[in-house]
Amino acid sequence: MAQDPILVIGGGISGLTAAIEAAECGCEAVVVEKNAYLGGRVAQLNKYFPKLCPPLCGLEINYRRIKENPRLTFHTQAEVTSITASGGGYNVTIQVAPRFVNDKCVACDACAQACPSERSDDFNFGMSRTKAAYLPFDQAFPQKYVIDGASCKADCGKKCQEACKYGAIDMDMKPETLNLKVSAIVMATGWNPYDITRADNLGMGKVKNVINNMMMERLAAANGPTSGKILRPSDGKEPKKVAFVQCAGSRDENHLPYCSYICCLASLKHISYVKEQYPEAQATMFYIDVRTPGRYEKFYWKVRDMEGVTLTKGKVAKIYNAQGTDDPVVVIEDVLSGKKVEEQFDMVVLASGMEASQRTRPVPVSVSYTPEGMIIPSSLPPGIYASGTAKSPVDVAKSMQEATGVALKSISKLLSAGGAN
């Protein structure tokens, strides 16, 4: 008997893991991803724990597993707009936005070279620009260009069509509506960096050389806006004195009242990025508490003991521009000394917290959320499961562990309904 597929909402590391594990166990799996590529936030990292290696290595292995498994299909630039219970499973409606590039694309870059329009590069958090015809990043999967219709001026799409000798540009593509019957649903909707401009005392968006932690990942990445060279945004200067501000929006009842779990480790990692490139640089981490659970404690000791690294206990009250320069000044009460300190830096990196994506883009299913927008798993209907940062802040390793667990639950649900081959 033909089986109804398992639907995975979200093509980040958690969603891909769940879908691949299910498909390799013999089940049909369908991934729905809102971006034009698979990989989620992990694809934007320079290095990730525990091995501190480039995440694209691990992602490439998963991409290959997807290519080799006919049981796994995916839809990018797609969103689930409706979920209704039906006969022990669910009827799902998916809206797919036009890519304006078909499967004939060989990623030759001719369309981008001919394209006269530009757009802000969201993959690099606006720190660079791309043409309106673009590849999201150099190792993107699918390895296929996309055209940002909103950024096209007049009939500039014709330039792309004329430049493409493979007939891959199709400006007549229309939005598609897909209707599926699925046996189970995995909600792996991921997270966004908290919009720390809401905390106006921390200078994000007002002080030129204040960035967030994900922007730092892109600056350090070889495929980032500066080809991996850490340079401050205002003038391209090499920063020799960098501040790292913890709990930027986290553990704050006015923003995210919870600990975002990964921020301390991320900042320690970022300090190591700076010290690798600029051994003489000074790095100061301002913290409430340093949290590096389990096996990561040794990494904390290693970074803490580096020459030129200072850890100062205290919550930052304000960041402002030093008069006549683009240098940010950090105002903090040093808890251990009891003194108010103002110190000037070349650049400040804010450890902005993790905010569940469904807080701003809820999935259309009856479910209860915490006040912070995290899914409460016990409130989910039968056959619907939450994984990774959809229900709590977690790191990559934990996301993958949870994804494997919900894949097993989804398979069990399918088997209990008699839908396995």
Image: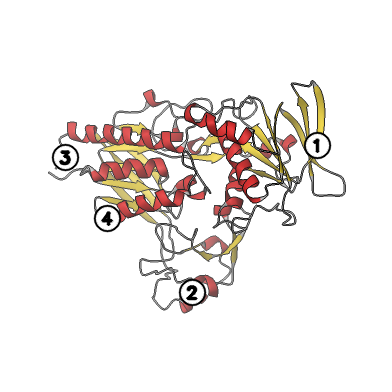
Near mark 2 (Cα within 10 A), the count class, few <14, some 14-19 or many ≥20, is some
The amino acid sitting under disc 4 is: Glu
| Quarter of the picture holding the C terminus | top left
The amino acid sitting under disc 1 is: Glu
- Seen in the picture, residue 213 relative to 144 is either above or below; the reply is above
Nearest-to-viewer mark from 4 and 3: 4
Measure the alpha-carbon separation of dots 4 and 2.
Answer: 28 Å
Near mark 4 (Cα within 10 A), the count class, few <14, some 14-19 or many ≥20, is few
**Residue 343 got which mark?**
1
Measure the alpha-carbon separation of dots 3 and 1.
Answer: 63 Å
Assess whether mark 2 and mark 4 are in contact (beta carbons under 8 angstroms).
no
Percent position of residue 326, x then y: 80, 49
The amino acid sitting under disc 2 is: Ala
**Residue drawn at (40%, 48%) of the image:** 58
The amino acid sitting under disc 3 is: Ala
Percent position of residue 116, x then y: 59, 72
355 sits left or right of 104 in the view: right
**Residue drawn at (52%, 70%) of the image:** 112
Assess whether mark 3 and mark 4 are in contact (beta carbons under 8 angstroms).
no
Q: Tell which circle, 4 or 3, labels the residue nearer the N-terminal end.
A: 4
Measure the alpha-carbon separation of dots 2 and 1.
Answer: 49 Å
